[in-house]
Amino acid sequence: MKIIMLGAPGAGKGTQAINIAKEYDIPHVSTGDIFRANIKNGTELGNQAKAYMDKGMLVPDELTIGMLLSRISEPDCEKGYVLDGFPRTIPQAESLKKALTERGEAIDAAVDIEVPDEEILVRMTGRRSCPQCGATYHVSFNPPKAQDVCDRCGHALTQRSDDKPETVKERLSVYHAQTKPLIEYYGNEGVLRQVDGTMKPDEVFSAIMEALK
Ligand code: ADP
Ligand code: ADP
Ligand code: ZN
């Protein structure tokens, strides 16, 4: 099973990608998480990516595409994967398609989680993330069992530096200009599955499972 998550920043891609990965027993591949791990480890790629991420801009395709294609060539991705945060541009989608076609493979589904912009800002400013395992929470909508502690791994939760209101607004405008066209792209590929992302997290997950049947 090869699944792509589409939707605005804050739509719930990460939250649902973790559920989907567990359900199908496939890896959750988040380009945002890979960039953040590189920043934490002080790699050259991390230093380059940080400058863009801090401004709410996309990291250039030249850096992003190679990184993702190499990740999905690893052995654990042989049984499939759920891509969270990739592709975000048409050239990224085309590079992915080319690489998969060369191996006789294809994407099975692109799940688009639909949430209006007004709701996004509320979600993003209340988001708390686990720097250790990538789990996300929300202070009111999806709080951890113990305050500021990750349910999955026990690490202390943090607020991402790019979840400030100004940066969120920039990320939303980047989404509309560069990423939203992928909805039509995957519609034309015949794999698009759209779900209402404004319901409760477990209801959104049920809708996704229904759409993937
Ligand atoms: P969110 O979960 O809020 O959508 P991500 O963790 O996916 O955010 O991404 C955080 C940042 O990492 C993005 O704003 C962007 O700067 C960078 N990034 C992640 N994935 C990509 C990608 N596929 N192409 C370009 N930049 C990316
Ligand atoms: P993305 O990966 O698309 O940027 P996240 O999964 O990180 O989005 O979710 C963004 C924020 O919204 C997090 O704080 C998360 O806990 C919260 N959230 C996710 N799904 C829902 C939902 N269905 N209803 C309310 N809040 C949600
Ligand atoms: Zn954790």
Image (cartoon, rainbow, N blue to C red):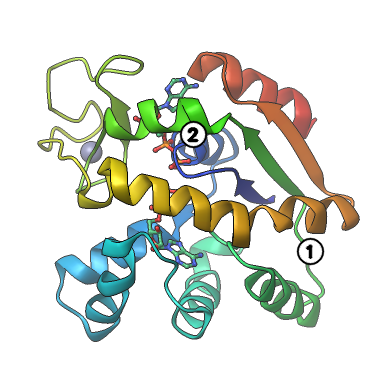
Which residue is drawn at the image coordinates 44% and 56% (left, top)? 30
Q: Is residue 37 visible?
A: yes
Alpha-carbon span between mark 1 and mark 2? 24 Å
Depicted 159 relative to depicted 189: above or below: above
- Classify 10 Å Cα crowding around label 2: few (below 14), some (14-19), many (20 and above): many
In the image: residue 162, left or right of residue 170: left
Which residue is drawn at the image coordinates 51% and 58% (left, top)? 174
Which residue is drawn at the image coordinates 52% and 79% (left, top)? 61
Three-letter amino acid code at disc 1?
Ala
Three-letter amino acid code at disc 2?
Gly
Q: Secondary structure at mark 1?
A: loop
Depth check: 57 or 19 in front? Answer: 57
Name the residue beneath numbered marker 1: 106
Q: At which x and y percent is residue 127?
A: 29, 32
Quarter in which the C terminus is drawn:
top right
Q: At which x and y percent is residue 106?
A: 79, 64
Name the residue beneath numbered marker 2: 12
Query: Mark 2: is the Cβ under 8 angstroms from ligand 2?
Result: yes
Depicted 212 relative to depicted 178: above or below: above
